[in-house]
Image: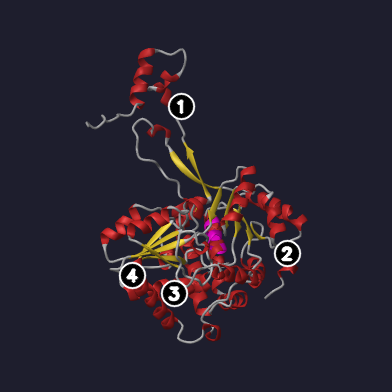
């Protein structure tokens, strides 16, 4: 691991970096589509040219297998950045609302304006994907960006700090490194948008700091993502996908399956299927095979050990067990027996909204019942993790799992101000608009009001 302390940005320099980004944005440098596309292409090459270095860095910081990093992190970054590169002209183009006879002379349209200087704060678990994907959206939207990588992934942070100036324009895209003290200093400054990915406690701190400046915030906070099991599902497939999803990055993933809700009379069958799935996924000791990431640091190891020490056994019973109340963020999978699907729905609804809801079933009515009676950021049927990277779908939480979107066109819109604009010709007053002026004349003003008033349908009969 690299010594990030040597890279920590001096506190007195942070306001200077922020001021430099503000001046660069005001110069208009980031607005031309050609500039945005060039920077996005360079961001693609920043990743593409250094794939092995990123894999090595993530191995050093998280012990993550190179193939897993390539598949679930680096490839996802390239997909997102290339998507922004391919679509930035379309996303940034002026929009026209539906035609209206009354308003057509004013040429109503929506300009897609960059918000200004945005702040991106990323976590340790996917430190490349969760920083560079929002960066791509912010670049596409024409913003200047201050990036704050996780201080827990020192090798990755050092690599990003080295590579960014070699590929991107550092007048408008700048990295600040540091821990709590540096982040606190950053949050004292006014930004035009903040995107934070991490836990809910820090998310509240970010939102509180942003409120001082009335800064809009996007929060991707994770949350407990349940798996609802229908006994009629393909048990072997469900168990293997859930177990794989739980062990990817050693469970340090905000969309990892966090616990399983299974009917009591199906519990033993499903637990046995989970055990078999584990044996298939890890036929040899994962500590020796190199097929399992490590927990990021000793503090998190002790936290997970304490959770295990406080359980009643390998299967979690009761609604007040800590494992079923807080996001685990580790390779522990509680199995919670419930009476039926209604009890599973009640269990979910008594808690904060999950980031992802996983449902395993072959029954359409079972699926509809769960989806229609719960609320989550996203949902996946008979799959885990993979669907959250599906192209064209916005990704984000709801309620305690966050708000706003972090990928694709939805993320572009996050960093964009939709500026409603009209341009009315002077001759418009010669028609009906002169009726707005005082002294009012009843007949012309009535006609103008009548033209503007919508037609309201009658109430339905009882």
- The relative height of residue 14 versus residue 446 in the rendered view (above or below) is below
Stretch of the chain drawn in magenta: 131-138
* In the rendered image, the vertical position of residue 215 relative to residue 104, given as above or below: below
Q: Which residue is mark 3?
A: 244
Q: CA distance from mark 2 to mark 1?
A: 58 Å
Q: Which residue is mark 1?
A: 426
Q: Does the magenta stretch mainly form a helix, a strand or a loop?
A: helix
Q: Are marks 3 and 4 in contact (CB under 8 Å)?
A: no
Quick check: can you spot residue 30? no
Q: Residues within 10 Å of mark 2 (few under 14, many from 20)?
A: some
CA separation in Å, label 3 and label 4: 21 Å
Q: Residue at x 56, y 51 (%)?
A: 31
Residue 410 located left or right of residue 101: right
Quarter of the image for the C terminus: give it.
top left
Task: Classify the position of the N terminus by image quarter.
Answer: bottom right
Camera-nearest label, 3 or 1? 3
Q: Earlier in the sequence, mark 4 or mark 1?
A: 4
Neighbour tally class for label 4: few under 14, some 14-19, many 20 plus, Cα within 10 Å: some
* Residue underneath mark 4: 266
Verify CB contact (< 8 Å) between mark 2 and mark 1: no
Judge depth for marks 2 and 1 and give the one in front: 2
Which residue position is annotated with label 2?
8
Alpha carbon distance from label 4 to label 1? 74 Å
Judging from the image, the colouring scheme is: secondary structure
Residue 370 image point, x, y percent: 34, 57
């Amino acid at each position: 691991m690299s010594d990030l302390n040597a890279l920590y940005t001096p506190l007195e320099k942070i306001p200077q970096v922020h001021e430099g980004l503000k001046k660069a944005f005001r110069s208009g440098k980031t607005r031309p589509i050609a500039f945005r596309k060039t920077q996005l292409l360079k961001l693609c090459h920043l990743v593409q040219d250094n794939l092995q270095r990123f894999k090595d860095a993530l191995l050093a910081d998280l012990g993550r297998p190179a193939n897993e990093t390539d598949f679930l992190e680096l490839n996802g970054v390239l997909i997102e950045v290339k998507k922004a590169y391919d679509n930035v002209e379309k996303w940034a183009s002026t929009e026209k609302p539906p035609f209206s006879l009354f308003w057509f002379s004013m040429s109503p349209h929506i300009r897609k304006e960059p918000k200004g200087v945005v702040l991106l704060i990323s976590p340790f678990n996917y430190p490349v994907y969760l920083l560079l994907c929002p960066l791509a959206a912010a670049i596409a939207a024409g913003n200047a960006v201050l990036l704050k990588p996780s201080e827990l992934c020192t090798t990755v942070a050092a690599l990003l700090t080295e590579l960014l100036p070699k590929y991107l324009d550092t007048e408008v895209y700048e990295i600040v490194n540091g821990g709590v003290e540096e982040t606190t200093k950053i949050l004292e400054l006014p930004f035009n948008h903040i995107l934070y990915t991490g836990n809910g406690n820090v998310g509240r701190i970010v939102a509180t700091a942003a409120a001082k400046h009335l800064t809009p915030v996007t929060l991707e906070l994770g949350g407990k993502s349940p798996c609802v099991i229908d006994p009629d599902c393909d048990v072997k497939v469900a168990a293997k996908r859930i177990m794989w999803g739980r062990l990817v990055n050693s469970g340090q993933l905000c969309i990892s399956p966090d616990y399983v809700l299974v009917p009591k009379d199906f519990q033993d069958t499903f637990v046995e299927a989970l055990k078999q799935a584990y044996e298939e996924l890890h036929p040899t000791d994962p500590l020796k095979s190199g097929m399992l990431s490590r927990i990021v640091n000793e503090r998190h190891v002790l936290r997970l050990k304490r959770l295990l020490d406080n359980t009643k056994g390998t299967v979690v019973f009761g609604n007040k067990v800590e494992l079923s109340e807080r996001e685990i963020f580790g390779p522990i999978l509680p199995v919670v027996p419930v009476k039926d699907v209604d009890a599973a729905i009640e269990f979910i609804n008594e808690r904060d909204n999950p980031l992802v809801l996983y449902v395993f079933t072959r029954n359409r009515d079972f699926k509809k019942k769960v989806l229609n009676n719960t609320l989550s950021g996203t949902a996946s049927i008979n799959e885990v993790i993979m669907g959250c990277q599906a192209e064209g779908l916005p990704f984000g939480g709801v309620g305690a799992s966050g708000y706003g979107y972090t990928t694709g066109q939805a993320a572009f819109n996050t960093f964009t101000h939709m500026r409603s604009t009209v341009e009315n010709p002077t001759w418009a007053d010669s028609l009906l608009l002169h009726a707005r002026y005082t002294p009012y004349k009843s007949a012309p003003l009535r006609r103008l009001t009548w033209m503007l008033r919508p037609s309201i349908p009658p109430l339905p009969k009882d």
